[in-house]
């Protein structure tokens, strides 16, 4: 499968724990995006990378959230001290260059109990 | 500000055409998109249209853009049960996919 890959697909965690998600973009896609989708809503932009540089962060990305793309390939999204309000689907997408097409992965569904 | 609105539900009979409508507020939108999401799955890019185009057709899909009214529609011809999903309208305000603003989605259900 050469699409965007996200792991894990599901994560259940206790409130206050830290979680980390991984995204592997389509090979040679230099741009990578993170979105968050809550039930009944469309995805909301969180942040994006061009190669290893994080170029934009949404105000939705609080201090408890951090994203990295250390070698310009895969990316990780970490949430520290999780809260129930963090429960959502976290989607990763990638695109090539400055083209308009962004391709999404299957997402990681986070449940904070 | 940026906002994308669409109706929440649409029900059509199998074999009929489905038309999903969307309005957006940002006149500087460069690309407008339609994504499909099936239950428990990620988003599938169906099609997109550049803002200087009025229409784009791709097999059973037809996208119409009225830039003056900031109105986008997706027509699915000969709707099948496999078309049941949530359809998201979205816009990008720059010339790339760097930040896409999504609507809340229209749930399309197909009745026999």
Image (tube, helix red, strand yellow):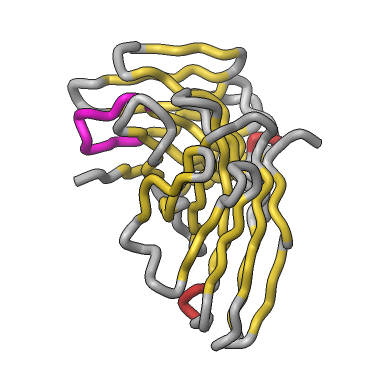
B5 or A29: nearer the viewer: A29
* Quadrant in which the N terminus of chain A is drawn: top right
Q: Residue at x 31, y 25 (%)?
A: B30
Residue B75 lies within the magenta run: no
Q: Residue at x 35, y 25 (%)?
A: B95
In the figure, is residue A40 to the left or right of B31?
right
* Quadrant in which the C terminus of chain A is drawn: bottom right
Residue B30 lies within the magenta run: yes
Span highlighted in magenta in the image:
B22-31
Q: Position of residue B20 (x, y in %)?
A: 44, 33
Q: Quadrant of residue A94?
A: top right
Q: Main secondary structure of the magenta part?
A: loop
Q: Position of residue B24 (x, y in %)?
A: 27, 37
Q: Relative to residue B19, is residue B3 depicted above or below?
A: below
Q: Quadrant of residue A8?
A: bottom right
The residue at the far front in this view is A71
B5 or A101: nearer the viewer: A101
In the figure, is residue B99 to the left or right of B85?
left
Q: Relative to residue A92, is residue B21 depicted above or below?
A: above
């Amino acid at each position: 499968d050469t699409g965007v890959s996200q792991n894990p697909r599901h994560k259940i965690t206790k409130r206050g724990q830290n979680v980390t998600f991984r995204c592997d973009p389509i090979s040679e896609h230099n741009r990578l995006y993170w979105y968050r989708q809550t039930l009944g809503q469309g995805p909301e932009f969180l942040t994006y990378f061009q190669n290893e540089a994080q170029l934009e962060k949404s105000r939705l990305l609080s201090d408890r959230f951090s994203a990295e793309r250390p070698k310009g390939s895969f990316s990780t999204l970490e949430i520290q001290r999780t809260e129930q309000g963090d429960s959502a689907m976290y989607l990763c997408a990638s695109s090539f260059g400055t083209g308009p097409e962004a391709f999404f992965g299957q997402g990681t569904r986070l449940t904070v109990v | 500000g940026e906002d994308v609105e669409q109706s929440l539900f649409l029900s059509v009979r199998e074999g009929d055409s489905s038309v999903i409508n969307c309005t957006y507020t940002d006149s500087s939108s460069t690309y407008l998109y339609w994504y499909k999401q099936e239950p428990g799955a990620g988003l599938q890019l169906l099609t997109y249209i550049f803002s200087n185009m009025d229409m784009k057709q791709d097999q059973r899909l037809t996208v119409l853009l009225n830039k003056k009214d900031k109105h986008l529609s997706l027509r699915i011809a000969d709707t099948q049960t496999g078309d049941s999903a949530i359809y998201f309208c979205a816009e990008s305000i720059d010339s790339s996919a760097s930040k896409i603003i999504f609507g809340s989605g229209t749930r399309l259900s197909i009745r026999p």
